[in-house]
Image: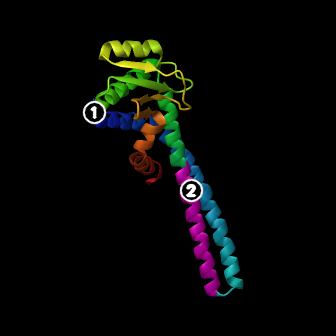
Amino acid sequence: MALADVKLKIEEDAKRQAEEILKKAKAEADDIISKAEEEAQKIQKEWMQRAKEERENVFKRREIVANLDLRKLELAMKRALIEEVLSKANEELCQLDSKTYATFVTKLLKTAVKESEAMEGVLYVGENEKIITSEWIASFNEENGTKLTLAHERLPHKGGFVLNLGDIDINCTFDMLITNIKDDLELIIAKALFSN
């Protein structure tokens, strides 16, 4: 399986898992935007009152500043929602059932081995990894003719693995996989959350 296929699989899985999260996040986004609109109306009323007391040019400058602040606040809230969706997508990947998780990391590892053309290496897994064990790696080695070993040291990531090939590390942690496709996912999530 080519790296592009793995990327596509990850995107598809993330999209599916993100859809559920997006529904929930959409409701939260609507609530946040509603509150932001209420705050904007409050700010606008305050500026209207001041406009009566101050000159027109001062009012215009302050209105511009208020609108910029409101846009910044709205953008920050949207950014926070997108980050939350990505974080939840990562959590969903980490919470795959054992069989699905094993199938997924097997495909990732096969791709990493194939792309690197290395048959020997050391696998580093997360602190709470339960699927990728010495027995699992032995089975993988037998099926694929590789000589991989499990590192004694555990890394502070959730889900996936890092394949060390001497001077080269192939990072297939879920955090890194999502980071690699983050730009594409952010556009999809933003459209789903904020398009009206």
Across and down, in percent, residue 88 comes to 52, 37
Q: Main secondary structure of the magenta part?
A: helix
The amino acid type found where label 1 is placed reads: Ala
Q: Quadrant of the N terminus?
A: top left
Q: Is residue 122 above or below residue 37?
A: above
Instruction: Report whether 58 appears left or right of 177.
Output: right
Across and down, in percent, residue 130 comes to 52, 19
Label 1 SS? loop
Label 2 SS? helix
State yes or no: residue 74 in magenta.
yes
Q: Which label was assigned to residue 76?
A: 2
- The answer to whether residue 23 shows anywhere in this view is no
**Considering depth in this image, is 166 or 19 the residue closer to the camera?**
166
- The answer to whether residue 70 shows anywhere in this view is yes
The amino acid type found where label 2 is placed reads: Ala
Rendered residue at 46%/29% (across/down): 160
Across and down, in percent, residue 151 comes to 49, 22
- Range of residues picked out in magenta: 56-80
Which quadrant holds residue 141?
Answer: top left
Across and down, in percent, residue 98 comes to 46, 18
Q: Quadrant of the C terminus?
A: bottom left
Q: Nearer the viewer, mark 2 or mark 1?
A: 1
Rendered residue at 48%/18% (across/down): 131
Q: Which label was assigned to residue 36?
A: none
Q: Residue furthest right?
A: 53
Instruction: Report whether 175 appears left or right of 142.
Output: right
Q: Is residue 151 above or below residue 26?
A: above
Q: Which label was assigned to residue 2?
A: 1
**Considering depth in this image, is 119 or 67 the residue closer to the camera?**
119
Q: Are marks 2 and 1 in contact (CB under 8 Å)?
A: no
